[in-house]
Image (cartoon, rainbow, N blue to C red):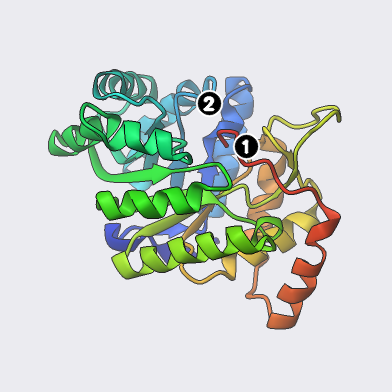
């Protein structure tokens, strides 16, 4: 079974793999059911979904009657105003067939302009705070997907006391000095605040470019066990990280789970060897949603 780690001040013991429901956005219910069953059998108890992930909310909805009390459920909004975010929240609850979330997050707040819109007067943050007051969610979080997301989120945390953050990290990005500085700064701030840390794009290899898209991810993923295992082990070796969202493709889910089940902390030598290979891959494009 998968290791569990404490999701910061929420106190939830989250599996180190969060089910990235972006993988369900373009599949039928039978395929979605098989993926959810695989995750549950491995001990995944943390699910992440968003209305921008195609039909993902609808694919998860039928499961809520049987698993809602046993999982930690994240949802998000990429709306920037209070009114729009409130409307989207209620739509998500209807589609997910539940009356509450565990965590509701501002989605894709990587740029300063998005942060200002969300946190300013009449912004989406007001909808999140209201939802918490109404019991529609227990905790509030913020996510970002761009290279400058760590620095933007560090600034957002100085303005509002979020419970969790979600941002991209992998060994290729970690090899970039500026990104590494900002990401480590955010991790340090989260540790100081006792915040939960979700990581996305663990197994991102690089942008698709002109290559045929063989997976449903917005980026080209690693899709063999060796590379996925090394990428997962690298991220799980970073102090302060709670859980990794699985890749947004059902075919990679089994590889991702197996990698987490078998992961052991990397030695300093193994880590340096992996970082030395980062130049063999394109810098992952992290501007997409998942």
Q: Quadrant of residue 169?
A: bottom right
26 lies left or right of 15: right
| Residue at 36%, 47% in the rendered image | 70
138 lies left or right of 103: left
On residue 53, the disc is: 2
Q: Is residue 261 visible?
A: no
- How far across and down, in percent of the image, does residue 279 sit? 82, 58
Q: Front-most of 44 and 167?
A: 167
Vertical side of 270 occupied by 126: above or below: above
Vertical side of 19 occupied by 288: above or below: above
Q: Quadrant of residue 89?
A: top left
Q: Is residue 287 visible?
A: yes
Q: Secondary structure at mark 2?
A: loop
Q: What crowding class fits label 1: few (fewer than 14 Cα within 10 Å), some (14-19), or many (20 or more)?
A: many
| Residue at 29%, 23% in the rendered image | 81
| Residue at 78%, 34% in the rendered image | 208
- How far across and down, in percent of the image, does residue 233 sit? 66, 65
Q: What crowding class fits label 2: few (fewer than 14 Cα within 10 Å), some (14-19), or many (20 or more)?
A: some
Q: Determine which residue is flagged by label 1.
A: 248
Q: Front-most of 237 and 169?
A: 169
Q: Quadrant of the C terminus?
A: top right
- How far across and down, in percent of the image, does residue 13 sit? 38, 61
236 lies left or right of 102: right
Label whose residue precedes the other's in the sequence (1 or 2)? 2
Asked whether the beta carbons under mark 1 and mark 2 sit within 8 Å of each other, the answer is: yes
Q: Quadrant of the N terminus?
A: bottom right
- How far across and down, in percent of the image, does residue 211 sit? 86, 30
Q: Front-most of 125 and 263?
A: 125
Q: Quadrant of residue 14?
A: bottom left
Q: Secondary structure at mark 1?
A: loop
| Residue at 64%, 64% in the rendered image | 177
């Amino acid at each position: 079974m998968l290791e569990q780690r404490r999701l910061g001040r929420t106190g939830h013991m989250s599996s180190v793999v969060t089910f990235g429901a972006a993988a369900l956005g373009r599949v039928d219910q039978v395929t979605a059911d098989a993926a959810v069953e695989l995750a549950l059998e491995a001990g995944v108890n943390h699910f992440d979904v968003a209305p921008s992930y195609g039909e993902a909310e609808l694919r998860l909805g039928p499961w809520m009657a049987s698993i809602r009390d046993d999982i930690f459920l994240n949802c998000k909004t990429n709306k920037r105003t209070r009114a729009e975010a409130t409307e989207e929240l209620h739509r998500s609850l209807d589609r997910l067939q539940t009356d509450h979330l565990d965590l509701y997050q501002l989605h894709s707040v990587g740029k300063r302009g998005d942060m200002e819109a969300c946190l300013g007067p009449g912004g989406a943050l007001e909808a999140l705070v209201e939802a918490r007051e109404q019991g529609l969610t227990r905790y509030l979080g913020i996510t970002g997907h761009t290279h400058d997301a760590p620095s933007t989120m560090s600034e957002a945390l100085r303005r509002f006391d979020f419970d969790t953050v979600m941002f991209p990290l992998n060994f290729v990005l970690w090899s970039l000095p500026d990104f590494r500085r900002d990401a480590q700064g955010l991790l340090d701030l989260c540790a100081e605040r006792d915040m939960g840390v979700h990581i996305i794009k663990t197994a991102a290899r690089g942008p698709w470019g002109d290559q045929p898209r063989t997976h449903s991810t917005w980026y080209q993923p690693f899709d063999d066990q060796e590379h996925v295992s090394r990428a997962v082990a690298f991220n799980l070796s970073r102090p302060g990280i709670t859980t990794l969202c699985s890749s947004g493709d059902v075919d990679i889910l089994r590889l991702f789970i197996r990698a987490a089940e078998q992961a052991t902390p990397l030695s300093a030598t193994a880590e340096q060897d992996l970082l030395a290979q980062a130049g063999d891959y394109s810098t992952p494009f992290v501007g997409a949603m998942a």
